[in-house]
Image (cartoon, rainbow, N blue to C red):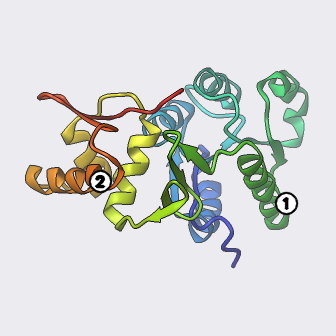
Amino acid sequence: MNNEFKNLTILYAEDNLIIQENISKILKLLFSKVYIASNGKEALELFKRYTPNIILTDFIMPIFDGYELTCEIRKVCYKVPIVILSNYTDKEKLLKCIPLNLTQYLEKPIEYNKLIDTLHLCKNHLEKNNFLRFTISNKLTYDFQTKKLFIDNKEIYLTHIEIEIFEYFINKKNQIITKDELAIIIYEDKYINENALKNVIYRLRKKIGKDLIKNDRNLGYSLKVENQ
């Protein structure tokens, strides 16, 4: 099984539950995390919450269709790779998606080899646009693909839980994140002790510099990123 995507995340939106189950099984073997939505509204909420690396969405869906979802995502991020899935009969409708900077579209039913080729195209897009290596300051960078943090090109070791929190900080850069939000995101609805969370934040601040992660009184924390 291909392991080139093992450190990447993907959002998959599909309202047909049988197709959703079949494709999601493949994606879960390939990606570190797969966020699954059954309509465009769910997909948009997941995108805003997790900021996945790649978007794979059906064209015809309830609430928001693939076009409307793509429009909303493009208001936030113009370069994240988006692939739209469509039936042959939807080709003409897809023409209005051209200005939305789609990475690719796939015709349903989806062939495995074409899916893999398209995912490679998405990964190349991420690498070309430097989406997999994030610059936090003039000294600090983070590589999403290798899960490594560098200060002046020297690797700084992060534990698994530190990586989870730090990536969430990056995805929500310059925004206040509540303690409850961090606890729920990291432990998937299993609330953690506030002291345990404080301990992880303390370790992160010690490694990257206390001035980058701000403690906003009674509100939560925020990662201050330069030039963003």
Residue at image position (61%, 57%) is 18
Q: Position of residue 211 (x, y in %)?
A: 30, 37
Q: Position of residue 153 (x, y in %)?
A: 55, 58
Residue that badge 1 annotates: 114
Residue that badge 2 annotates: 204
**Neighbours of disc 1 within 10 Å: few (<14), some (14-19), many (20+):** few
Q: Is residue 180 left or right of residue 111?
A: left
Q: Position of residue 165 (x, y in %)?
A: 34, 51
Residue at image position (71%, 74%) is 2
**Neighbours of disc 2 within 10 Å: few (<14), some (14-19), many (20+):** many
Q: Earlier in the sequence, mark 1 or mark 2?
A: 1
Element under disc 1: helix
Residue at image position (82%, 48%) is 106
Q: CA distance from mark 1 to mark 2?
A: 41 Å
Q: Which mark is residue 60?
A: none
Instruction: Tell me which amino acid carries mark 1.
Output: Lys
Instruction: Tell me which amino acid carries mark 2.
Output: Leu
Q: Quadrant of residue 14?
A: top right
Q: Residue furthest front?
A: 152
Residue at image position (43%, 49%) is 167
Q: Residue furthest bottom?
A: 1
Q: Is residue 211 left or right of residue 153?
A: left
Q: Position of residue 160 (x, y in %)?
A: 36, 66
Residue nearer the viewer, 38 or 166: 166
Can you say whether 189 is above or below 216 in the image? Answer: below
Q: Are marks 1 and 2 in contact (CB under 8 Å)?
A: no
Label count reads: 2
Residue nearer the viewer, 88 or 2: 2
Of discs 1 and 2, which sits in the foreground?
A: 2
Q: Quadrant of residue 23?
A: bottom right
Element under disc 2: helix
Can you say whether 101 is above or below 191 in the image? Answer: above
